[in-house]
Image (cartoon, coloured by chain):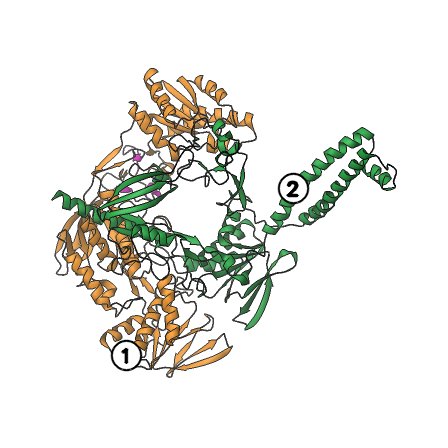
Amino acid sequence: MRIGVFICDCGSNIAGHLDCAAVTEYGSNLPGVVYAKENLYTCSEAGIVEIQKGIKDHNLNRVVVASCSPRTHQPLFQSSCAAAGLNPYLFEMVNIRDQCSWVHMQERDRATEKAKDLVRMGVSKAAFLEPQDDIEASLIPRVLVIGAGVAGLSAAETMADMGLEVVLVEKEAEPGGLLNDLYRLSPYGENSSERIGEIIKAVSSKPNVTLYTGSRVEDIGGYIWDVDITVRQGGGETVKEKVGCVVVATGAVPLTPEGLYGYNGRDVITQMELEERLLKGEVEAKGIVMIQCAGARSPEREYCSRICCQTAVKNARLLREQSPETRVHILYRDMQMYGTENEQMLWDARGEGVRFDVFLPDRPPEVGEGKVRFYQPLTGERVEIPCELTVLSTPLVPREDSASLSQLLRVPVDQNGFFLEAHAKLRPLDFATDGIFVCGSARYPANVEEARSQGLGVSSRIATILFKEKLVTSAIVAEIDPATCVGCMGCMEMCPYGAIDYLPEEGVCRVNRILCKGCGCCASTCPSQSAMLKGFKPNQLLAQIRAV
Amino acid sequence: MLDVGRHPNIELMAYSEVDKVEGEAGAFKVTVRRKARYVDEDRCTGCGACAEKCPTVVSDAFNEGLGQRRAVYSWFAQGIPSTHTIDADHCRQLNGKKCGICKKVCQADAIDFEQQDRFIDIDAGAIIVASGYDVFDASRIPEYQYRQIPNVITAIEFERLLSASGPTSGHLHRPSDLAVEEEIKGLEKKAAKALKMLGKFEKKYEKGSEEFYLEYRDGKYEGDEDRRKWAEKYEAYLAVSGPLEEMKKEAEAFDVAKRLAFVQCVGSRDFRFYPFCSGYCCMHSIKEAIIANEHEPETTSVIFGMDIRAVGKGFEEYKIRGGNQSGISYIRGRVAEIVEGPGHNPVVVYEDTRERKVMEQAFDMVILATACAPSRDVEGLAEILGIEINRFGFFQTGTSQPLDTTRPGIFTCGCAHGPMDIPESVAQASGAAARAAQILTDSRMRKAS
């Protein structure tokens, strides 16, 4: 064993709070260590040269750097080792800055002792490191998009322009999704079917998009980057396709408010039904009351559906534009007119004579006998509004089949049934599982602009993967020894990435090393130590622990 | 940030501005002005030795002026790149005085007082404008007295106070209290200095100052010039120590802020300033109130808003949880006025629309949820880029391509596009990247064929 240890001063960040020279001296006497060197900045050009020189001059077969955080500097040190001819997985990093000098600034002696302990642990583990090769996989530059609404179509259009092949599967007979049934769009009042028509036309003109309408994804096999899908078409025949990535763009549907506010589909209808009537020019009512949050923001459906307020205001203005004598009254809890154009639309609507009134959720409006009665908190009185038509603004709810799709794709849904992204803020369009993405109202209610932006966004997420010639990932993945695995499937439940399969014929579990992220959940769960994480095997970790 | 900083395909030019854009989609020529840092980026390792030794103390803009930094500094600890910068407005050396300490202590030899702005030309096929927004200046609203009442602060200032790495290490000390404590520190220094001086006299005449002073007042040492000086010094000491003791007594009663008010739509939904809704501020206030309560479980918060716009995924649930578990109550209405009550407590005057009464309520601290204002120099940037601004002051985009500006090949996302929260911004950023890739692959294909 020929281990080289490099201790970093990090300027005064480490050397200012502990004795780096003493740690270096200590390191040089540890078993297996043939060379130890202190550097002012190991990450600087000079520091890197020191490592590479050390590897060559002293024929090192393990390198330990004691410095800062692996998160920031491990890739640099590993690639530097590789450049000097040492397998990068024979590198070990010890954090004596963030986890030592920075947290023990007032205790120089004890910090020095702790740094020695940490270096000893790193060296002990390094002795058991094994060389590894990065994992490479080929990529199929072809994408499955499920759902041809505005989000899915936008994704398909953009990816096709980027030169990727797209398989677009739509359940309905025509592409377009909800936009087919809408009248005009907020905030500019564009014709909905014309708008979606343009996008459909653009997608249809792409030779590299295959559109299956009236079809469903029936089966998904293989694994991500190399997915076998079976599409069942309207006529019953099936087609098989092979893709590299998958986009979920299945949208959502407006809630049908059975039992709410006397809903009957005649004079108490939903916004969606109002859109249909507006399309056909069938609205004759001169007194209209809209009630917001019908079936939303309630104990059984806690979430706010984001887009119903803008829809209501848009329709209220259209109604008054068509017949200025129409009285439109919107009863709301909070007008959710976020952003620039929405809020402007709210002010314009007020100026044009649309009436707005707050109601309290614990005293909801009552609908019946040609009027809506509600408690008006501003006056403290009960108010009656005569009306011929009551329109309920109901939330978008997840599609019924989204649960089965989530099982098929092995991706999660949230407590409301919408697809759950990898990170609410930083990865809104990714699933935790690689290669599967989500956009539009399948993720959460979105208006046309938002759904389109997200469709575009998904395209670049996929481009970052499929534009590469091949996939190269870290070799730090788990493996399961089939000789000792008893097939208890405990690891499968723990794996957050769906990277473990059970092979019924062999009666054992197997890790898909392309999907594995090296988190180690399986290894720590496995009762027979059959699952092991490379680079963190029991002998490596125990060597480290026993050195304390 | 870290991923961007070390990505092999990304060249990060921080502390730089776009100066000129020529050409067209697929073939832009962009001139970038790299502002002089007076620190060589390639050499600086970000160790911070310079900032440790720099003698010039400057108000820290990153901490909203609530803390201090030096004239050589990094914007904040985790910033990428970690390269330090010399603030040319305050650096002694750059203002003709003798110093150069940073140059002496820098072991990487990175300090370069001769550095000039450099202009760099870049070929770019597409441009994405993600220049963000500016926080609305709350002092423009006279009735909230942001500058006059110390314990009325902005949401961003509150964010810094809540931060463990911020100027108060995450404790909600009130600005009025912090000012007193700052004054105590100053007076203590003065008092210590005066005591040292008195000590010399006491030693010389072998007598305590207090005893001497009584005698002096009785006219015992008339005509003694040295003793007159002693008496003067003692009087100066009394002038410091009296108020110091009082302030210390006052400071003993200081506590962290536990009764908080959040005022929504400060500069937003207001025709005097910005008519639009800034979108993220309701959730920002709720988050700040929840975190304040996590720090100090006795904390209660009142959020005053015309509507509470919790419209994103999980937001309404978060709002309800804040009400149930974190001591938040929500009151509908726009705050009319903030005045200062006893004990530097800001008093919020508002109409409770549910009770139909004008109310007054005192708080320890009031936080103003300031608007997402278009960037101060948005017109200048728009002119350089040759793109248009919409009626709200953000970059104009198309309806069929929501991330396209008015000039082909230039895209926008995030708050430069309009007020929005993080997930929306991130999704848009990916979308803008896709638009750029779309035209780039397109032009590449054209060239290939």
Compare residues B122 and B146 and report the one nearer the observer: B122
- Give the magenta range: A476-501
Q: Is residue A420 visible?
A: no
Q: Type of residue at label 1? A: Val
Is A169 within the magenta? Answer: no
Q: Is residue A288 above or below residue A204?
A: below
Q: Secondary structure at mark 2?
A: helix
Callout 1: few (<14), some (14-19), or many (20+) C-alpha neighbours within 10 Å? some
x, y (%) of residue B448? Answer: 13, 42
Depth check, front residue: B374 or B380: B380
Q: Which chain is orange?
A: A
Which tint is chain B?
green
Q: Residues within 10 Å of mark 2 (few under 14, many from 20)?
A: few
Which residue is identified by label 2? Answer: B186
Query: Residue placed at 35% from the left, 62% from the top?
Result: B391
Question: The N terminus of chain A is located in which quarter?
Answer: top left
Does the magenta-highlighted stretch encompass residue A486?
A: yes
A105 lies left or right of A162: right
Q: Which mark is residue B334?
A: none
Q: Position of residue A82 (x, y in %)?
A: 30, 26
Residue A283's disc is 1
Q: Is residue B199 left or right of residue B29?
A: right
Q: Could you say which is closer to the camera, residue A178 or residue B428?
A: B428
Q: What main secondary structure does the magenta stretch of the protein show?
A: loop
- Residue A47, compared with residue A220, is above or below; it is above
Residue B100 coordinates in the image, percent (x, y)? 50, 30
Q: Within the image, what quadrant is residue A312 found in?
A: bottom left
Tell me the chain of label 2.
B
Q: Quadrant of residue A191?
A: bottom left
Three-letter amino acid code at disc 2? Gly
Q: Is residue A379 above or below residue B379?
A: below
